[in-house]
Amino acid sequence: MRILVTGVAGFIGSHLSEQLLTNPNVEVLGIDQGIESEPLKLRNIRYLLKHPRFKLFDRDLLTDDISTLLKDLNVLYHLAGIPGVRSSWGSEFETYLLHNGLVTQKLLEACKGTSLDKFVYISTSSVYGEKEGRVTENLIPIPLSPYGITKLTGEQLCNVYHQYFDIPVVILRYFTVYGPRQRPDMAFHRFIKQLILGKPLTIFGDGQQSRDFTYVKDCVKATAAVLEAKNVIGETINIGGKERATVLDVISILENLLNTKATLTFAEKAKGEPRHTWADITKAERLLNYQPEVFLKEGLKYEVEDLSQLFKSGRESN
Ligand SMILES: NC(=O)c1ccc[n+]([C@@H]2O[C@H](COP(=O)([O-])OP(=O)(O)OC[C@H]3O[C@@H](n4cnc5c(N)ncnc54)[C@H](O)[C@@H]3O)[C@@H](O)[C@H]2O)c1
């Protein structure tokens, strides 16, 4: 089976590709851009680069023609994009719009008339906005941030290309993913780094905001399960985690894991972030046989180990 993963050198794309390659019948073509000049991206794909069934293509999906890579392809996982809520305001919005919106449209166009079995678009809980309790996929999305708006644009493009051109789309909405290789702008990465370096932790808001945290291995198992799943074309599916927690709960676990006491500084609440997120994963259980397994304490331990190695190896400066 020939699979294309966009955003392969990113946090989740690299884990997904490793997961897919555990199947001996799978060959992965990975696309990302600017890899050579970014040490963290190279670090993310260091195992993949040694794998005999993996091929890397340094391409910008916004400007490069990738039609030859779509030939004889079975499944396409589209993870490439610009993530993050806080930086999506202001002048950066154009980048979000181009790489999340236009890139998705170009890929869908390029897939017209191909023999693709599944086009899996990776979306986000940020499309929901502020909701009460567990969210099901049929709720009306009302994103609070420019980032959420561009990801919802991607979803809606998938839906119309499915309707009019039979592109076999499947949409997965991830809920805050964490674990080894987590992006440097994400909260756990920042907290662990600040704790290791003995610096104060910056919390946006009062720290009582809660998230449905998804360990990256759980997330990519669910994503890989789409390959064999029946009755998923045209569906939108939440991928949530094992546990919910507040930001302050997480800091307390990290203090224990790192055997240190955090100094907290509180900054203004970030614009565009909901107070709580909570996934209803009944549909993922039914269609993907998904059951998240990793508790927060265990997943955080793995992320702490990974980041401790990163800082020791001096790849990232303070
Ligand atoms: N990390 C999370 O908690 C989370 C939650 C919900 C949804 N998502 C979604 O999952 C996907 C992956 O997120 P991540 O955290 O791994 O982000 P990431 O930034 O680590 O990975 C995204 C990758 O896409 C690549 N990319 C962007 N534009 C490109 C282009 N034009 N051509 C080629 N490559 C391009 C980037 O270089 C990057 O390596 C994103 O679509 C994001 O919106 C992530």
Image (cartoon, grey):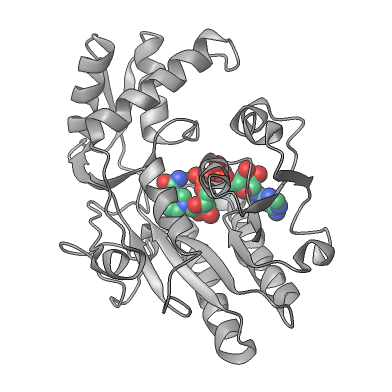
Residue 311 image point, x, y percent: 51, 13
User: Please, is residue 178 above or below residue 73 in the view?
Assistant: above
User: Please, is residue 35 above or below residue 133 in the view?
Assistant: above
Residue 75 image point, x, y percent: 61, 65
Name the residue: 49% across, 57% down. 147
- Towards the viewer: 239 or 22: 22
Residue 73 as seen in the image, left or right of residue 71? left
- Towards the viewer: 3 or 175: 3
- Towards the viewer: 268 or 77: 77
Q: Does residue 88 show up?
A: no
Residue 93 image point, x, y percent: 58, 56
Residue 304 image point, x, y percent: 37, 21
Q: Does residue 223 show up?
A: yes
Residue 202 as seen in the image, left or right of residue 79? left
Q: Quadrant of the N terminus?
A: bottom right
Which residue is at the far front? 24
Asked which quadrant contains residue 253, the reply is top left
Residue 139 as seen in the image, left or right of residue 171? left
Asked which quadrant contains residue 266, the reply is top left
Name the residue: 75% across, 73% down. 110
Name the residue: 71% across, 66% down. 73
Total numbered badges shown on the rendered structure: 0
